[in-house]
Amino acid sequence: MNSVMKNILVLTLAILSCGILNAQESKSLVRDGAFDKIATKEKEILKYDDIREADVLWSKRVWRVIDTREKMNLTFAYPQEPLIQILLEIVQTGETSVYQNDDFSTAMTAEDVNSKLGSTDSVLVVDPETYEEVWEVVQNDFNPEAVTKIRLKEDWIFDEESSTMIVRLLGFAPIEDVYDDNGNFRGERAMFWVYYPDFREHLARYEVFNPWNDAQRMSWEDLFEMRYFSSYVMKESNVRDLRIQDYATGIDALLESERVKNEIFIYEHDLWSY
């Protein structure tokens, strides 16, 4: 084996080991099952009840984090169809918009989202004609496994008319882990923000994996509405607009997160007399 072939082989192995080539499973060209699954595809969502401002006795805005590596949240990172892949498919249709931040003030196009997928690296390769080493720019494929968290924004409201505590999910964002050229973890970034009321109808047409029964699968809209996930509070509305991590760390941050959740529960509980 000559030196050129060795360099090409080494480069290929390096790319594979770094996860640059991210093979995605292709969809089956035939019916992969004993029966047609059409219930989810034809499902229609139920509209929310209107809430009058005069009936809102109390409200609290919180931001939560879903860690997809937790056992209860593994469906968010289902290898055959993770949530991030579904969101990208919906975005590519152009029927809905996504946003740069959680106040939904700046819209993003499908091209803007695509520009954030993957990355570029410079690698040293050998020119097969001159046998000289040259630098080439390589486009890295997007790796869905880099999305390890989902950030939620929601409002908790006590409605006097129905005497119930209502939670309304406003939006969520896939959070991607960011690494430098040496593979060191540099932090997290929100890829884009989804306005949930606009995405509900689309999410209702995608199934969520059910580990107990393949014949009874819920949709992603069902999962969010029934809150079938584990999460922790990262921020509540406050006068300084601080996240919990800005004033608490370690076990204190976890306790503060639990305090916010208990505050919502206790408020509703104390409205009733037994």
Image: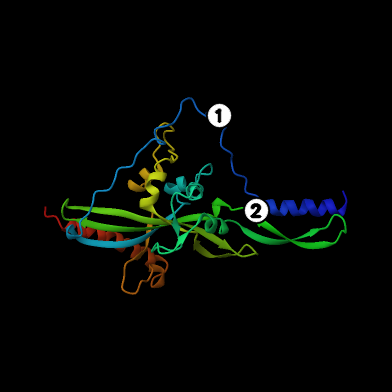
**Type of residue at label 2?**
Ile
Q: How far across and how far down the image is residue 227, in percent?
A: 34, 48
Disc 2: CA contacts within 10 A as few (<14), some (14-19) or many (>=20): many
Front position among marks 2 and 1: 1
Q: Quadrant of residue 119?
A: bottom right
Q: Nearer the viewer, residue 42 or 143?
A: 42
Decide if residue 156 is on the left or right side of residue 231: left
**Type of residue at label 1?**
Val
Residue lying at the far left of the rendered structure: 274
The relative height of residue 40 versus residue 98 in the rendered view (above or below) is above
Q: Earlier in the sequence, mark 2 or mark 1?
A: 2
Q: How far across and how far down the image is residue 54, in percent?
A: 17, 60
Q: How far across and how far down the image is residue 86, in percent?
A: 48, 46
The relative height of residue 236 versus residue 20 in the rendered view (above or below) is below
Q: Which residue is mark 1?
A: 30
Residue in the image at 33% along x and 47% along y: 225
Q: Which residue is mark 2?
A: 20
Q: Quadrant of residue 140?
A: bottom right
Q: Nearer the viewer, residue 160 or 18?
A: 160
Measure the C-alpha gap from mark 2 to mark 1.
30 Å
Q: How far across and how far down the image is residue 7, in percent?
A: 81, 55
Residue in the image at 59% along x and 40% along y: 25
Residue lying at the far top of the rendered structure: 34
